[in-house]
Amino acid sequence: MATKPQTINDNQAVTGLSNQEILRYSRHLIMPEVGMEGQLRLKNAKVLLIGTGGLGAPLGLYLAAAGVGKLGLVDFDVVDFTNLQRQVTFGTSDVGKHKSEAARARLSNLNPDIQIESFETQLTSANALELFRDFDIIVDGTDNFPTRYLVNDACILLGKPNVYGSIFRFEGQVTVFGMPLGPCYRCLYPEPPPPGLVPSCAEGGVLGVLPGIVGSIQAMETIKLILGSGDHLIGRLLLFDALGMKFRELKLRKNPDCPMCGTNRTIHQLIDYYEFCGVRGEEAPAPNVQVPEITPRDLKARLDRGEDLYILDVREPHEYQICNLKGHLLPLGELPRRVHELDSSREIVAHCRSGKRSAEAVDFLRKAGFRKIHNLRGGILAWSDEVDPSVPKY
Amino acid sequence: MAVKVIIPTPLRAYAAKKDSTEVTAQTVGEALGSLTTQFAELRKHLFTEDGKLRSFVNVYLNDEDIRYMAREATPVKDGDVVSIVPSIAGGARENG
């Protein structure tokens, strides 16, 4: 007769599986590398996922399917239509719902025998230690530098492993930080890049499968840590180039002078990570310059009156193909060497997708002597909202 | 010495979209110098204004971090691979 599945209890290890669980995990149980002992280790394990997005999707799905007894899901965000291209935990009907809750519902359906807790909150220096305390392993699937340093420091302070993965366009990095003899994130990257040197949205985007692969490798490392088997990515940085389809491996050393995990630790508590990284919140850093602006409605009115305005589109050619305002395409990166193509005697309105790149273009052109030039406030996104909804947003 | 320099995705925009290039150099520093001569726009992403390697840019000779060798003075030999390993944070949120 089937026994009722036991759920994990903080004080007491689960010592058996129900018949239904034995059937569910039979492909694990018949492998000597997992077996009953390994499956019970999984069932007694508590893993906290920071982020339920692109990396969090395969992580959540595989760790739930594998029978990790307690999964915590931390995410403050809501499911957006543009997430569905890669965040495969979510369906179209989840758009608008909180990610942590939508993921919890999906993972509970996948495996009702495990405990899943959703934390609909932003991870901060105020709540990180409290949140992490109840879990054995922390998995970093976030998308910004402040949270990555926060996750690292909280893991070091609490002595917990940090399964790290990050992606950019076609490239991924995976490793395990926070093990007693291994390095931490600060050993590898003592300082974050200044906001101005982070790639702009002209080079943004990600191939949807990439977080699937990188997150799956993180899931594999998490399971191996729980099972205590195999060679872990401790002291090794795995680099994955999806375009070249190449994996490479670099040695990571524990930095004896690391301010966090070195012999003379200088950081003893969590700090303000937004200040440390030079950015505030999730917002894009504001352009350093104030440039003359025109609103989409004003531009429309002036064009309707037949005024002679030169529309300068500083996006990339592949973005122009998505949608355009019939402007003259001259990507921001090419502006310095193609500036002679522009006529400074004409009135120019520069635009991009959101208004950020075109603000830089307007600033550059003003310094080059252009006087009759405006930035289209809010870019194509605002144009679509305020003037012409038939122009798609992306 | 003929050395291959691997250019990571975030920096390819400043290197004519190339993923690697061959340079001739005696040291890692010379290899990076030659790289930024080929691709001038890369310079500010790798070096500070006074010519020091930026602290958030990691450089590896084959699979070793040059910080644990002789840094930029680390000698190279024919067939060595110099990799630039930048910090990437994504996720996939875009900010423009």
Image (cartoon, coloured by chain):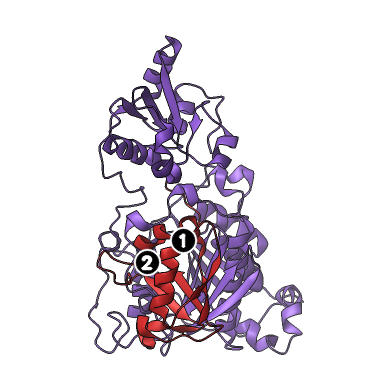
Q: Is residue A288 above or below residue B27?
A: above
Where residue B92 sits in the image (x, y, percent)?
50, 54
Q: Specify the subunit that label 1 lies on.
A: B
Q: Are marks 2 and 1 on the same chain?
A: yes
Q: Residues within 10 Å of mark 2 (few under 14, many from 20)?
A: many
The N terminus of chain A appears in which quarter of the rendering?
Answer: bottom right
The quadrant holding residue A288 is top left
Crowdedness near tag 1: few (<14), some (14–19) or many (≥20) residues, C-alpha within 10 Å: many
Residue B5 visible in the current orientation: yes
Residue at 76% of width from left, 78% of height from top? A27
Give residue A276's position: percent from left, percent from top. 27, 64
Residue at the image position 33 percent from the left and 52 percent from the top: A281
* Chain that is coloured purple in the picture: A
Chain B appears in which tint? red
**How far across and down, in percent of the image, does residue A45 sit?**
54, 78
Front in this rendered view, residue A206 or A267: A206
Left or right: residue A98 versus residue A270 is: right
Residue A352, position as x, y percentages in the image: 44, 36
Residue marked by disc 2: B46
Distance between the alpha carbons at the discs numbered 2 and 1: 9 Å
Relative to residue B52, is residue A56 drawn left or right?
A: right
Element assignment for label 1: helix
Tell me which amino acid carries mark 1: Leu
Say what secondary structure mark 2 lies in: helix
- Residue A357, image quadrant: top left
Up-down: is A181 above or below A6?
below
**CB of mark 2 within 8 Å of CB of mark 1?**
yes
Residue at mark 1: B11
Please name the amino acid that badge 2 sits on. Answer: Leu
